[in-house]
Image (cartoon, helix red, strand yellow):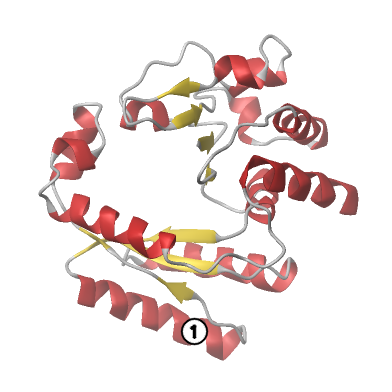
Amino acid sequence: MLFDADMGLANAQLALGCRTDFNFSHVLSGEKSLREIIVTTPQGVRLVPGASGIQQLASLGEMDAAGIINAFSEMDEEIDYFIVDSAAGISDSVIAFMKGTQRRFIVMRDEPSSIADAYGMIKVLALEHELNEIYLIPNMVDSQAAGETLFRRLDDVCQRFLGITIGYLHSITNDGHVLDAIRAYQSVVEFAPGGAAARDFRQLAGAIERLNPIEGADGGIQFFFERLSSNRHAQ
């Protein structure tokens, strides 16, 4: 299950090639229940669509956070993985979603602004909120070697100035098929299964599957709901 938690500029439904008549804004307004907005994509993924182009949803307040918690508390689906795709930045809602998950994956490119943003996010998560299980995913790199080099550079900085280490699983190679797939409203794994990016996404998925279970975490939607709820009470 994928929760598109970018409440201001959600677009997961476009990348996965499915139509969504309703989104999370209808849940927060009380028009629909969470069950009523979930769709199944052509790939078999259960998608919780976020809202796009609704400015007030880009920065959720405490009441909206309570609405999200209440919405997910009703879910009892058996799922393999629950993925939360959050917006960029360090807004309260983004941090709340990060705290509600078992692992955090930071996607970055080899550009000064992207590196600075990734470091800032890691610093906030690790130092201010004492979160671990932070992994870096270098994106649009020239090769796996270039991605590993980028990871080591940032990991060295984190060790030196933050006193922490971050994890690494796999990089995504720069591949023109990605943009073509988006234009075709398909995932790149379907559009160009033999391409470099599709290969990297499969290898990244395999690396995530091989990660050891986190002790004390039941997983799934219930874990996410409980973590969001406890974070809200702690505030």
Residue 62 figure quarter: top right
* Residue 39, image x, y percentages: 47, 20
Please indicate, yes or no, whether residue 159 appears anywhere in the rendered image. yes
- Residue at 51 percent of width and 46 percent of height: 81
* Residue 208, image x, y percentages: 42, 61
Residue 120 figure quarter: bottom right
Q: Is 125 above or below relative to 91?
A: below
| Amino acid on which the number 1 mark rests in the picture | Val
* Residue 78, image x, y percentages: 58, 36
Count numbered badges in the picture: 1
Mark 1 burial class by Cα count in 10 Å: few <14, some 14-19, many 20+: some
- Residue at 24 percent of width and 33 percent of height: 182
- Residue at 68 percent of width and 53 percent of height: 218
| Residue receiving disc 1 | 157
Q: Residue furthest left?
A: 194
Q: Residue furthest front?
A: 78
Drawn side of residue 98 relative to residue 181, left or right: right
- Residue at 49 percent of width and 62 percent of height: 117
Q: Residue furthest bottom?
A: 160
Please indicate, yes or no, whether residue 86 appears anywhere in the rendered image. no
Q: Is 235 above or below relative to 39?
A: below
For label 1, the SS is helix
Drawn side of residue 175 relative to residue 102, left or right: left
Q: Is 43 above or below relative to 18?
A: below
Drawn side of residue 117 relative to residue 161, left or right: left
